[in-house]
Image (cartoon, rainbow, N blue to C red):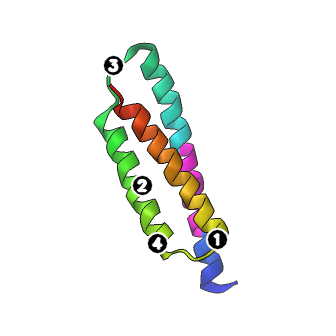
Amino acid sequence: MGDAGEGLIDTESRLQERREELERAKEERRARDAGELKPPRAEVESLRLARVELERQLAATTHERRRAALKDAIAELDRRLAELTQP
C-alpha cells in the first residue's frame, strides 16, 4: 500500500476525530441551549481552525471521494459556526 495508503488511513482517522468532536460540540450546544447564553470562544476558534485545515487538505487532494468527504465536513463546520455565531 505504501505511503499513499498510510496517508489515507491517517486522514480518515483525523476525519473520524473531527466527527467525534462535532458530535461532542452538538451535545454541548444542546446543553448550552438549555441554559447558557454564549458559545465558548474556544469552540468557535476550534471550528475555524478545523475549517482551515480541511480547506488545506481539499486543495491538496485529487481523489474525488476524498474531496467529497472534505466538502461535506467543511459544510458541517460552516453550519456549526453559523449556529454558534447567531445572535
Callout 2: SS: helix
Callout 4: SS: helix
Residue 62 appears left or right of 38: right
User: Residue drawn at (50%, 23%), measured in percent from left and top?
Assistant: 30
Q: Answer whether residue 14 is magenta in the image.
A: yes
Residue 3, horizontal then vertical, whole percent: 60, 83
The answer to whether the residues at label 4 and label 1 have Cβ atoms under 8 Å apart is no
Callout 3: SS: loop
Residue 37: assigned label: 3
Residue 44: assigned label: none
Pair 2/1: label in front: 1
Callout 1: SS: helix
Name the foreground residue: 46 vs 67: 67
The answer to whether the residues at label 4 and label 2 have Cβ atoms under 8 Å apart is no
Q: Mark 2 points at which residue?
A: 51
The part of the image, by quadrant, that contains residue 87 is: top left
Distance, label 3 to label 2, CA atoms, is: 24 Å
Q: Mark 1 points at which residue?
A: 64
Q: Label the magenta part by its dominant secondary structure.
A: helix
Distance, label 3 to label 1, CA atoms, is: 40 Å
Question: Disc 1 residue type?
Answer: Glu
Distance, label 2 to label 1, CA atoms, is: 19 Å
Distance, label 4 to label 2, CA atoms, is: 12 Å
Q: Mark 4 points at which residue?
A: 59
Residues in magenta, as a range: 10-20
Residue 17, horizontal then vertical, whole percent: 55, 52
Q: Answer whether residue 17 is magenta in the image.
A: yes
